[in-house]
Amino acid sequence: MSNPRNTKAKQAVLNEIANSSFALSQPELFERVKGTCDRVTVYRVLDRLVTENKIHKIVNIDGTINYAHCASCDESHTHAHDHLHFSCVKCKKIECLEEQLIHVKLPDTYQIKELFLTISGICPSCSLS
Amino acid sequence: MSNPRNTKAKQAVLNEIANSSFALSQPELFERVKGTCDRVTVYRVLDRLVTENKIHKIVNIDGTINYAHCASCDESHTHAHDHLHFSCVKCKKIECLEEQLIHVKLPDTYQIKELFLTISGICPSCSLS
DNA sequence: TTGCAAAACGCAACAATGTTGCAATAAATG
DNA sequence: CATTTATTGCAACATTGTTGCGTTTTGCAA
């Protein structure tokens, strides 16, 4: 783990995430890279990509875990988790709204580590139809 | 479903949720009401209690689904989902901070239905130890 | 190039969580 | 107290995620 390698499976998974406009779940990702690697490998690749700060792990409103490319985060620093996720109840897609930052004040007795704000509703493209 | 009944299983589950200071998962609830009813019944009771607006369904940061009594919501109106959930990374408990309301502005093209804000960190009691 | 250590993989088996169908049971109402 | 139907239990299945282990592949260096 100290020296990460660039494998076919890793490239395939990362490619699918990078080229998607919305967050993808493990089952969705496995479906897209099927033939390239095993189901278990997708899980392990995803864990590694999260650890390496290459992708972003998002929990949807229904509890499903999704992975997204994070445009504003590069490898040099840890991911910012203070932005907003929009979850469309119609097309079920999640997107990161990174320009929307969240500011919350709590009593000093609470130590805040991360913020997860997900809003559900109808996304712009689903509003048209 | 049109005429909900008050059964032993329902009372037992609701009682555990009402008497807990933090949100409970299905496995935790089943453990607490074990002997009263079947595992499947707990799932079905929880679904019904959510539909009847008796309890609150919360997705934790790790994707686990938890259920909580909602003090500010009564049966006459739908649950407000515009408050904050605090998830302690130490004791793993979730609590609703209902006095903290969230206000977010999005472009008009987004139709907002519900807001889910979860903050992870160290809760007051875990901060002491 | 070629050899080597370690990272990564495939496979199989397991574990946890949630769902469905259906016959049996029990709660509310008159 | 009888009837209706909401609710339950059980069994079987589905999905998602995890672990162990022997094998393969990658990156690096001789």
Image (spheres, coloured by chain):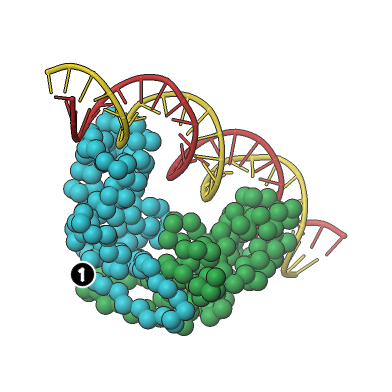
Chain colours: A cyan, B green, C yellow, D red
Place of residue A4 in the rendered image (x, y in percent of width and height, measured from the top left): 26, 41
- Which image quadrant for residue B71? bottom right
Residue B83 versus residue A66 in the image, above or below? below
- Which image quadrant for residue B119? bottom left
User: In percent of the image, x 20 and y 49: which residue is there?
Assistant: A18
Left or right of B118: which side holds D10? right
Report whether residue B116 is seen.
Answer: no
The answer to which of B22 and B106 lies nearer the viewer is B22
Residue type, numbered disc 1: Glu
User: In percent of the image, x 62 and y 50: which residue is there?
Assistant: B40
Residue A38 versus residue C20 in the image, above or below? above
User: In percent of the image, x 34 and y 36: which residue is there?
Assistant: A41
Report whether residue B40 is seen.
Answer: yes
Secondary-structure class at tag 1: strand
Place of residue A107 in the rendered image (x, y in percent of width and height, measured from the top left): 44, 82
Quarter in which the N terminus of chain B is drawn: bottom right
The residue to which callout 1 is attached is: A99
The subunit letter for the residue under badge 1 reads A
Residue A7 versus residue B61 in the image, above or below? above
